[in-house]
Image: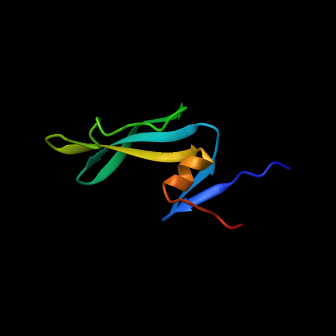
Amino acid sequence: MNTVKVYLKNTQEVKVTSRFIYNISIYKIWKNGASLIEEKYYSSSEPLKLNKIPKILHKENYLIQRFVDLIGATEEYLINKGYKLKKV
């Protein structure tokens, strides 16, 4: 049986993988609701640098907001970023 290690920081759980795996979703948000515009998964050999792209774009009557969720990462990266091994 192959067990996957899971690390935890605050309420975020991240699996140990050989590559960095992200879920990136973009929402349109207005006064009375929100709608998912696009959702994609990305895999990378290095952590993504997303600082160059704004998280929120303000439009006249709505916002466009980007959410990035780390799904998987190397164990070394997780330990260096302060994640703790989740006890089963």
Q: Is residue 34 left or right of residue 75?
A: left
Residue 42, given in percent of the width and then of the height, sits at 51, 33
Q: Residue at x 60, y 44 (%)?
A: 74
Image position of 9 with respect to 41: above or below: below
Task: Tell which of 1 and 32 is nearer to you.
Answer: 1
Residue farthest to the left?
Answer: 60
Q: Residue at x 62, y 50 (%)?
A: 15
Residue 45, given in percent of the width and then of the height, sits at 55, 32
Task: Tell which of 65 and 71 is nearer to you.
Answer: 71
Q: Is residue 57 left or right of residue 77?
A: left
Residue 63, given in percent of the width and then of the height, sits at 24, 44
Task: Tell which of 56 and 88 is nearer to you.
Answer: 88
Residue farthest to the bottom?
Answer: 87
Residue farthest to the right?
Answer: 1
Q: Residue at x 21, y 44 (%)?
A: 62
Q: Is residue 73 left or right of residue 59?
A: right
Residue 4, given in percent of the width and then of the height, sits at 72, 51
Image position of 23 with respect to 84: above or below: above
Coloration of the structure image: rainbow
Instruction: State the count of labels.
Output: 0
Q: Is residue 55 left or right of residue 17?
A: left
Q: Residue at x 54, y 59 (%)?
A: 83
Which corner quadrant holds the C terminus?
bottom right
